[in-house]
Image (tube, rainbow, N blue to C red):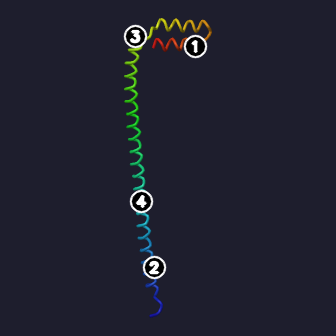
């Protein structure tokens, strides 16, 4: 039993190199699978967040529409309790006294008239 020959050393080197390549390939494959899994998890979470935002937006629109519907009912009832002519006369008097500017008078008038 002496030193191994050239062929024996080449065979051992080939085995070691083959094992290293196989291990390296396995590690790379595992890392790629892990990265893919993380990417898919991030995409899933982004989709869930988007779905939550969409649901919240739909709920906000529904609430706004319900509020507008109630506001329209109140607006329909408001003219009966508010004398628009009297209110316009009051605004005109405030404008003549200098309490309201032209712009404020116009805004208040527009608000009254709808």
Q: What element carries label 2?
A: helix
Task: Determine which residue is flagged by label 2.
Answer: 13
Q: Residues within 10 Å of mark 1 (few under 14, many from 20)?
A: few
Task: Determine which residue is flagged by label 4.
Answer: 34
Furthest residue to the right? 98
Q: Distance between the residues labelled 3 and 2?
A: 100 Å
Q: What element carries label 1?
A: helix
Task: Determine which residue is flagged by label 3.
Answer: 80
Q: How crowded is mark 2: few (under 14 residues within 10 Å), some or many (20 or more)?
A: few
Q: Distance between the residues labelled 1 and 3?
A: 27 Å
Q: Is mark 3 on a helix, strand or loop?
A: helix
Q: How crowded is mark 3: few (under 14 residues within 10 Å), some or many (20 or more)?
A: few
Q: Can you give x and y, in whole percent of width and height, for residue 107 in the image?
A: 53, 14
Q: Check if mark 3's residue and mark 2's residue have beta carbons within 8 Å.
A: no
Q: Check if mark 1's residue and mark 3's residue have beta carbons within 8 Å.
A: no
Q: Distance between the residues labelled 4 and 2?
A: 31 Å
Mark 3 vs mark 2: give the one in front. 3
């Amino acid at each position: 039993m002496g030193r191994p020959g050239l062929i024996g050393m080449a065979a051992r080197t080939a085995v070691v190199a083959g094992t290293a390549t196989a291990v390296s390939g396995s590690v790379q494959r595992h890392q790629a699978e892990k990265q893919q899994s993380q990417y898919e998890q991030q995409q899933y979470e982004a989709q869930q967040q988007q779905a939550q935002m969409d649901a919240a937006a739909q709920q906000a629109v529904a609430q706004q529409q319900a509020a507008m519907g109630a506001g329209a009912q109140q607006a329909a009832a408001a003219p009966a309790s508010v004398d628009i002519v009297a209110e316009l006369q009051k605004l005109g008097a405030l404008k003549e006294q200098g309490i309201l500017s032209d712009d404020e008078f116009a805004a208040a008038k527009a608000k009254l008239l709808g």
